[in-house]
Amino acid sequence: MYTLLPFIQLSILRSSSLIRIAVNSKGFTLLEALVAMAILAIGITAVIQLFSGALKSVAFSEEYTKALITSDASMKKLLLQDEIEPGEYIDDINNIFSLHTEIIQIDEERTELLPYDIYLINLTIIWMSGSKEKSYTITSTKLIKKSLNI
């Protein structure tokens, strides 16, 4: 084996008269480096997209949680009142949420002899999430003791 240059070796094969030149492989070729960088770029892009999706999920979850807490507090406030009036009400909460409340007295004829009036409360909270309108509805019933008119 004869060395011509530090990175090229010349070998003479004894079984045949072919001369083989081998490149000393102490580093990466340009093609190997480009392929490695392309694979790394694809991997980094995938990870960034995962983080982006996770951040969107967190933002949506935060909006949804605030809406649920607001609607739950409004429903509890209604349920704690001694008297409620049937009708439809719309409230704007901090210019973020719109609260639509519908109170209906149900089965008025059937409950005439009972000591309680039964009310159905539908509460819908609406908010904007980006360019889309989101909403959540909760429903409850409330019994209110009838006043005795003597």
Image (cartoon, grey):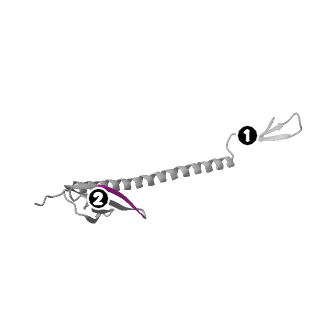
Q: Under tag 2, what secondary structure?
A: strand
Front residue of this view, candidates 105 and 40: 105
Q: Under tag 1, what secondary structure?
A: loop
At label 2, the amino acid type is Leu
At label 1, the amino acid type is Asn
Name the residue beneath numbered marker 1: 24
Q: Which residue lies furthest to the left in this view?
A: 150
Q: Is residue 138 magenta?
A: yes
Name the residue beneath numbered marker 2: 120
Residue at the (33%, 56%) spot, across then down: 138
Is 13 positioned to the left or the right of 134 in the image? right
- Which mark is drawn over residue 47? none
Quadrant into which the C terminus falls? bottom left
State how far apart marks 1 and 2 are (Cα). Answer: 85 Å
Mark 1 crowd level (few <14, some 14–19, many ≥20, 10 Å Cα) = few
Q: Do the residues labelled 1 and 2 touch (CB within 8 Å)?
A: no
Foreground: disc 1 or disc 2: 2
Q: Position of residue 61 (x, y in %)?
A: 40, 53
Residue at the (29%, 59%) spot, across then down: 121
Q: Where is residue 34 in the image (x, y as percent from the top left)?
A: 65, 50
Whether residue 126 appears in this view of the structure is: yes
Mark 2 crowd level (few <14, some 14–19, many ≥20, 10 Å Cα) = some
Whether residue 93 appears in this view of the structure is: no
Residue range in magenta is 132-140
Q: Position of residue 19 (x, y in %)?
A: 85, 40
Q: Would you say the magenta stretch is mainly helix, strand or loop?
A: strand
